[in-house]
Image: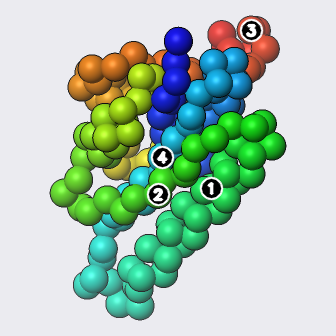
Amino acid sequence: MFKRIFVAIDGSRTSERAFTAALDLAVTHQAVVQPYYVVEAGPMYLDVPGYDPSSLHASLMEQGASLAREAADQMKARGVSGEVVTVEATASDDVATLIINAATAFDADLLIMGTHGRKGFQRLILGSVAERCLRQATLPVLLIPSAAGEPREKATQ
C-alpha cells in the first residue's frame, strides 16, 4: 500500500517514535523511506555583545548531521532503503511548507510526523508544525502523538 514514506525528524522523542513507525511500515510494505530534518534559522542577535550566531548555526548543523547518521544506521539495520535529507531553512521559510514541498518532491504516498517536536518560544508563536502540515497536505498523514508508547495510565495523566 505505502511505497514511499516521508518522515519529518527533529531529534525529539516524538519524532523518534514517528521514525520508528516509518521504519515499521517500510518493513511491512517494503517501502522506501526519506527522513527529513530542517535546520531552522534561529534568531540572529547581532547586537548582543559577545554573541556569535555562527556557533548556534554550527551546533544545529552538527545535530542534523548526527540525526542523519543515526537514521541511516537504523534504516540499514532494518533493511530499509532511502536517503536522509537535511535542509537549511531561512528566517522567512515556513517549516511546514518546506516539509510538504519536500514530501511532494519525493512523491511520497504517506507523511509521518510527531504531534509535538521541539518546544520553545518559536513554537508558541508559530503554532504546531504538525497541525499546519496536516492542513496543507494532499497526501495521507500519520501523526504520532507525544504519548505514543507510554503506558496508558501515564499517557492519560
Tell me the tag on residue 82.
none
- Give whichever of discs 3 and 2 has the lower sequence position: 2
Residue that carries the numbered disc 4 in the rendered image:
36
Chain-order first, disc 3 or disc 4: 4
**Residue 118 visible in image:** no
Q: Nearer the viewer, residue 10 or 26?
A: 26
Task: Looking at the image, tell me whether mark 2 or mark 1 is earlier in sequence order.
Answer: 1
Above or below for 115 versus 122:
above
Give the image location of residue 78, x and y in percent: 78, 36
Q: Amino acid at mark 1?
A: Leu
In the picture of the structure, the residue carrying the numbered disc 1 is: 67
The CA distance from mark 4 to mark 2 is 6 Å
Q: CA distance from mark 3 to mark 4?
A: 30 Å
Q: Is residue 152 visible?
A: yes
Q: Earlier in the sequence, mark 4 or mark 2?
A: 4
Residue on which the image places disc 3: 152
Q: Nearer the viewer, mark 3 or mark 1?
A: 1
| Number of other residues with Cα within 10 Å of mark 3, as a class: few under 14, some 14 to 19, many 20 or more | few
Callout 4: SS = strand
Q: Amino acid at mark 2?
A: Thr
User: What amino acid type should be assigned to the residue bearing mark 4?
Assistant: Tyr
User: Which residue is found at the position 50% from the left and 77% from the top?
Assistant: 58
Of callouts 1 and 4, the N-terminal one:
4
Q: Residue 70's x, y, as percent?
A: 70, 53
Residue at screen point 52% across, 24% down: 3
Number of residues whose C-alpha sits closer than 10 Å to that of mark 1, classed few (under 14), some (14–19) or many (20 or more): many
Q: Are marks 2 and 1 in contact (CB under 8 Å)?
A: yes
Which residue in the rendered view is the most extreme toward the bottom?
50
Tell me: residue 145, above or below residue 41. above
Which residue is label 2 attached to?
Answer: 86
Lateral position of residue 112 relative to residue 67, left or right: left
